[in-house]
Image: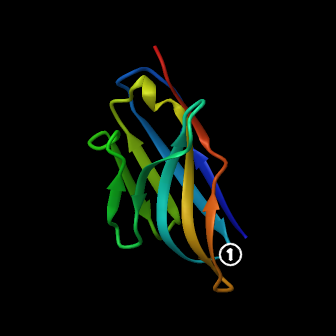
Amino acid sequence: QVLLVESGGGLVQPGGSLRLSCAASGSIFRIYAMGWYRQAPGKERELVATISSGGSTNYADSVKGRFTISRDNAKNTVTLQINSLKPEDTAVYYCNEEVMTSDYVNGDYWGKGTLVIVSS
């Protein structure tokens, strides 16, 4: 199985920054796309950013210029640097990865999320 564990969430003032990380472990042969999603209270989960195995990135319009996604293939980690935080960025942030396991089965995996609260 594959386990994704997010870290780095917390309470931050508007305009502040956080760095979210997601570490993957388990029976991993290869990780394809990696991404971050978020779900605000009372809202549906939405895409924040994705990064392909080749390093191509995609961002939601609401976070372009403020968020940066990166990956470390050697460590099976994906990071989301979030700057200029706004109250509307408050949400649970989830890591998502497309993984081929060591028995060559493809699957879509989610972490349990890390809470980001932007408030003064």
Query: Mark 1 Cα within 10 Å, few/some/many (few <14, many 20+)?
Result: some
Residue 53 image point, x, y percent: 41, 72
Residue at 60% from the left image edge and 30% from the top image edge:
42
> Residue 27, relative to residue 69: is it above or below?
below
Q: Is residue 26 left or right of residue 98?
A: right
> Residue 94, relative to residue 91: is it above or below?
below
In front: 88, or 55?
88
> Residue 65, relative to residue 118: is it above or below?
below
Q: Residue furthest bottom?
A: 104
The kind of secondary structure element at disc 1 is loop
Label 1 sits on residue: 27
Name which residue type carries label 1.
Ser
> Residue 2, relative to residue 115: is it above or below?
below
Residue at 64% from the left image edge and 86% from the top image edge:
104
Counting the numbered discs, the total is 1
Residue 91 image point, x, y percent: 54, 34
In front: 43, or 56?
43
Q: Residue furthest left?
A: 65
The image quadrant where one finds the N terminus is bottom right
Residue 100 image point, x, y percent: 59, 78
Q: Quadrant of residue 24?
A: bottom right
Residue 116 image point, x, y percent: 53, 32
Q: Residue furthest top?
A: 120
